[in-house]
Image: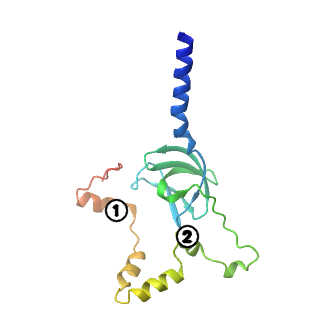
Amino acid sequence: MRLRWMSLLCAALTLAVLPASAGAGTMSVQVKNGELRETPTFLGKVVSQVSYGDQVQVNQEQGAWVNVTASGGKTGWIHNSALTQKHIEMNAGNQNVQTAASGDELALASKGFNSDVEAEFKSKNKNIDFTWVDHMIKWKVTPPEMMEFLKDGAVKPSEGGAP
């Protein structure tokens, strides 16, 4: 009888562990430029870059962060919102690669946004001024600048990192 209970307990523990490891495998990067970080926080040191369509191997998950290994062997943490289970293949087919869609266009199109959608939105919202949006897209904030901003504002990130 005791052996039967031990067997049932082992089976239950095995089933409890399976969902945690079910996410392991290969995933695709679904953002234009992703950053692999040393620690699972947006304030972690960037150790490598990944690009839209790159395949990464999942090693571990911690909350909303995934530890991955990119092609080339670099390992780091990336937020799960930058990844997808879908296989993204960057293939220009028989077209001249110079006339194929850019990585930016492919990233936007995979999210349902393209030049037709933009034109339709602008035609329906003629009073919207996109000047500041265009300006903000060009802003680049370095990790030291971000740390200084957080320190000055006495902001403590919820996911870690010490300003």
Q: Identify the residue at horizontal 70%, vertical 73% (top origin).
A: 92
Instruction: Report the amino acid beneath label 2.
Output: Ala
Residue in the foreground of this view, choosing between 153 and 56: 56
Amino acid marked by disc 1: Met
Label 2: which secondary element: helix
Split into 4 quadrants, where in the image is the N terminus? top right
Mark 2 crowdedness (10 Å alpha carbons): few <14, some 14-19, many ≥20: many
- Does dot 1 land on a helix, a strand or a loop? helix
Circle 1 is placed at which residue position?
146
Image coords of residue 57 (percent x, y)? 60, 49
Residue farthest along the right direction in this orientation: 94
Q: Is residue 103 above or below residue 37?
A: below
User: Mark 2 and mark 1: span between their CA atoms?
Assistant: 26 Å
Mark 2 or mark 1: name the one nearer the start of the chain. Answer: 2
Give the answer, above or below, for where 26 lies relative to 111: above
Residue hosting label 2? 107
Q: Split into 4 quadrants, where in the image is the C terminus?
A: bottom left
Residue 97, by quadrant, is bottom right
Residue in the picture at 66% in, 64% down:
89
Answer with left or right where residue 42 lies relative to residue 8: left
Residue 31: horizontal and vertical position, in percent?
Answer: 52, 64
The residue shown at (31%, 53%) is 157
Residue count near mark 1 (Cα–Cα under 10 Å), binned few <14, some 14–19, many ≥20:
some
The residue lying toward the viewer, choosing from 146 and 93, is: 93
Q: Position of residue 142 (x, y in %)?
A: 40, 65
Question: In the visual, does 9 lie left or right of 136?
Answer: right
| Residue 119 locus on image (x, y percent) | 48, 86
